[in-house]
């Protein structure tokens, strides 16, 4: 079992920045992908960014060039730096990892971008 604890969401104006953090409750190998998904009201959950060792990070087209995912393997923590935020980035953001065929999700952290 792995628990994922997110932090860093909040309310920000258009053009602002936020940094999300997600810490796993136990050591996660660097080869295990960790990432961020988001879900806006009335929409499906979508991948925002994902990172694993040996590969370039994956980003949704809508956040490319504005968001940066990074990872501290020693702390089993993944970060999402979000810059130049837009109202359409408003959503509940979830941390995710898949290990041994099991999907683990955080509880979600709300990001709200005001006009």
Image (cartoon, helix red, strand yellow):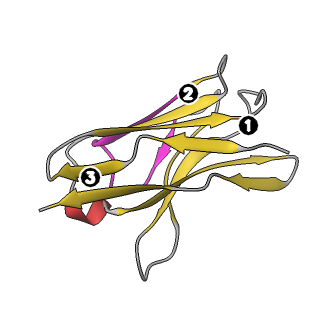
Mark 3 or 1: the one toward you:
3
Q: Give the camera-side residue of 93 and 35.
A: 93
The circle drawn on residue 79 is none
x, y (%) of residue 94?
54, 55
Q: Quadrant of residue 51?
A: top right
The circle drawn on residue 11 is 3
The circle drawn on residue 32 is 1
Distance from disc 3 to disc 2, alpha carbons, whole Å, reads: 24 Å
Residue beneath the point at 76% across and 56% down: 103
Residue 62 forms part of the magenta stretch: yes
With respect to residue 12, does 69 lie above or below? above
x, y (%) of residue 32?
73, 37
Crowdedness near tag 2: few (<14), some (14–19) or many (≥20) residues, C-alpha within 10 Å: many
> Which of disc 1 and disc 3 is earlier in sequence?
3
Query: Residue 60 vs residue 37: left or right?
Result: left
x, y (%) of residue 78?
56, 33
Q: Are marks 1 and 2 in contact (CB under 8 Å)?
A: no
Magenta segment: 57-71
Residue 68 forms part of the magenta stretch: yes
Give the residue at mark 2: 71
* Residue 12 visible within the image: yes
């Amino acid at each position: 079992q792995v628990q994922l604890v997110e932090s860093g969401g909040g309310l920000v104006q258009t053009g602002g920045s936020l940094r999300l953090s997600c810490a796993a409750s136990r050591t996660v190998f660097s080869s295990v992908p960790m990432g961020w998904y988001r879900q806006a009201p009335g929409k499906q959950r979508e991948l925002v960014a994902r990172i694993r060792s040996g590969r370039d990070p994956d980003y949704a087209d809508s956040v490319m060039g504005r968001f940066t995912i990074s990872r501290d393997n020693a702390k089993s923590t993944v970060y999402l730096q979000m810059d130049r935020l837009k109202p359409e980035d408003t959503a509940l953001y979830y941390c995710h990892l898949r290990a041994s065929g099991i999907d683990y999700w955080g509880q979600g952290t709300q990001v709200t971008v005001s006009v």
